[in-house]
Image: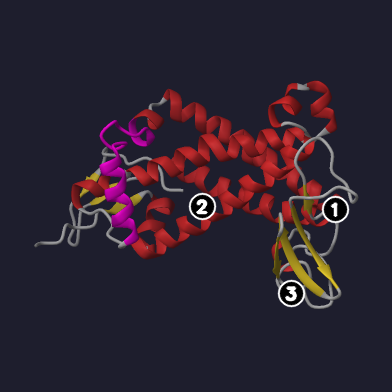
Amino acid sequence: MSEAISEDVRLSTGGGELIYRQPGVVRLWHWVNALSVIVMLMSGLMIFNAHPQLYWGKYGADYETPWLEIGSNNGSGFLRIGPVNIPTTGVLGISGDEERAFPALVTIPSSYDLAGARQWHFAFAWILVVPALLFWLWGLVGGHVRRDLAPTIAELHPRSLWRDVKDHARLRFHSGEAARRYNILQKLSYIGVIFGLLPVMVLTGLTMSPAMDAAWPWLLDLFGGRQSARSVHFICAALLVAFIVVHLAMVVLAGPFNEIRSIVTGWYRVPQEKES
């Protein structure tokens, strides 16, 4: 995820001004976060393979009716969401000669290993949570959140929001002075992930632990039961995957060299405004 735009150092060069955009703390957290999220997503898919059904409420087992199920029937894979049944042969539910919700290509470990997947998941949960807490502290105390991520009242105006939506749909990216700061869609998406999706995923993950439920029973009340927490956890993971896909697509469309250089070295070349 791209982060703070620093105005401390600027370097005028041809083809647009080169500015020091990403502080070292942001770049480090970005890559640690990316690694931990990818490992947790892949190990989480293996954990899901152990029981590929989702339920609402406190209880869920083979005799219950799930709201989401990935499986196979007579050699054909399927994804069922409520009453809607979607054939998925060769992708989900069954891959080759093996019946499993998600194929080995996207799981850690690649072979079925629930205990191993849990070890990977919990280990990288610490790598996700501890740096995230430090990043929140740095962002709030240092003013990064207020200065670079918090939307202004003008940006939240419906007309401004709609203009940015149209610009992104037409692949019209900001240039010149406007490119020095995040647009409203970037701000809302980053805040939503950092202070929304990630915390909810952590809390729902804790809710699925019997030990944590005994220590903090309010977690069960907060999410309406362990099975509801599992469903919310899965939905948040799916939204996080969608964010990653859109984020990578925007990096490619906006200019991958410039964007990747920014998050690796900190230096970003501001796109020049086109002359009318």
Q: Earlier in the sequence, mark 3 or mark 2?
A: 3
The image quadrant that residue 231 belongs to is: top right
Membership of 231 in magenta stretch: no
Looking at this rendering, what residue extends furthest in the right direction? 63
Which is closer to the viewer, label 3 or label 2? 3
Q: Main structural element of the magenta stretch: helix, strand or loop?
A: helix
Disc 2 on helix, strand or loop? helix
Q: Which residue is mark 2?
A: 243
In the depicted structure, whether residue 147 falls above or below residue 188: above
**Kind of residue at badge 3:** Thr
Any mark on residue 82, and which?
A: none
The answer to whether residue 242 is above or below residue 58 is: below
Query: Which-is-in-front pick, marks 1 and 3?
Result: 3
Q: Residues within 10 Å of mark 2 (few under 14, many from 20)?
A: some
Left of 188 or right of it: where is 230? right
Report if residue 148 lies within the magenta region: yes
Q: Position of residue 109 (x, y in %)?
A: 78, 59
Q: Can residue 54 be seen at all in this image of the molecule?
A: yes
Q: Nearer the viewer, residue 35 or 23?
A: 35
Q: Give the residue pinned by disc 3.
A: 89
Residue 265 percent coordinates (x, y) = 40, 52
Q: Amino acid at mark 1?
A: Leu
Tag 1 residue: 114
Marks 1 and 3, how far apart in space? 23 Å
Q: Amino acid at mark 2?
A: Phe
- Label 1 Cα crowd, 10 Å radius (few <14 / some 14-19 / many 20+): some
Q: CA distance from mark 3 to mark 2?
A: 26 Å
